[in-house]
Image (cartoon, rainbow, N blue to C red):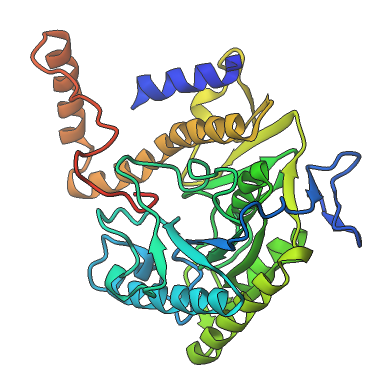
Amino acid sequence: MNKALLIALVLIVVSCNFETEVDTNFRVQFGDREPWELVNPAPDSDGQLRVLVLHDMEGLSGQSDPRTFSYRNSEFYPQGQEYLIGDVNAVIAGLFDGGADAVQVVDGHGSGSPEADILLDRLDPRAEMLTRYEPFEAYVDIVEEGAFDAVAVVGMHAKTGSRGFASHTYTLGIGVRLNGKSVTETEIVALSWGRVGVPVIFASGDDRLAADLATMPWIRYVTVKEATSASTANPYPVDEVRAQLRSEAQAALEGLSSARVMEISTPIDATLDAVPPASLAALEGVPGIDYEDGSVNFTTDTFREAYDGLRALVRVAGAGYSSVMGEVLQGFDPGGATYSRELFARWLDYESGRWTPPPSQSGTEGRVYHGYR
């Protein structure tokens, strides 16, 4: 681990336009260097056509209210689940129409619900939910050679700064650049599976994500709505969109041989860009940290190292959310007297041995995980 990442991790513990151009060979150019290579998929080794469906929850058909993808909004979240099961089942049906032998689904949203975001009792019975008994990173931990032949992503969103519906990258106020190229979560999924020669062949979301994915001209893309802001959208007719989801998923699998795998170029230049409400300002001036204008940059040799390093920096950037919390608390307690008093008491109690941090838990015994929490 390089010094920059080590310092970032320590801080976490303590603090608990370049344009792309695609030629006819699907080679993505970035200045004098390609951020990734596009190659043929790995050959099928067992004659079984297996597809992974990774779903998010911001790019669903019929959806125009951000409250529908938040588990904590009990009034609107059930409607989001209805949007989700309809879209995912349409894609699953299309994949089986296209010749799939097996389809597994993984939750790439992580609403905070202890259960799957998708309605499991209504999931197409031909498909299976991918689960584990320990928390896992849906983008990286399930990537195994020979596990799948293709990946389809459903209900995705545009990247931070794209002005799409609920556009972001990974979480609030975060942008990610890999080898200088600003990327979406769909591209992160594609680069992760590129490690084992598996292509992303299908995606759905709003019109802004469609523009973001010009770097992946082989995918079959379904635009489900027009984004009018980060919190509003004009959905297209749901029945028509669902029919298109099915037909395009079928076409994507039938055209698997023409898909391309994204292999990231190494060494990897990784950058995390923080915008409100996130902030990396706490790292400014720290020796060994390459911080400039709200961004931190580092170089590493593998995609997994880059991903883990970016995740560590995301946790640092999340400290910026506390500024919003402070504003909320001041509304209840002008001057923040209660917060200041409790913070002072926690310090004294810890120093006096009257309080110890609760033990960290990586998982809950007996719990089943369906993807991101």
Which image quarter: residue 85?
bottom left
Which image quarter: residue 46?
bottom right
Which of 230/31 is in front? Answer: 31
Query: Residue at coordinates 54% horizontally, 70% vertically from top-left?
Result: 229
Residue 5 percent location from the top left of the image: 55, 21
Which of 98/182 is in front? Answer: 98
Quadrant placement of the N terminus: top right
Query: Residue at coordinates 35% horizontally, 68% vertically from top-left?
Result: 67
Residue 131 percent location from the top left of the image: 35, 51
Residue 313 percent location from the top left of the image: 51, 32
Query: Residue at coordinates 47% horizontally, 66% vertically from top-left?
Result: 58
Is the residue 310 above or below the residue 63 in the image? above
Left or right of 230, for residue 351: left
Which of 263/185 is in front? Answer: 263
Left or right of 175, for residue 134: left
Examine the rendering and report whether any part of residue 217 can be seen. Answer: no
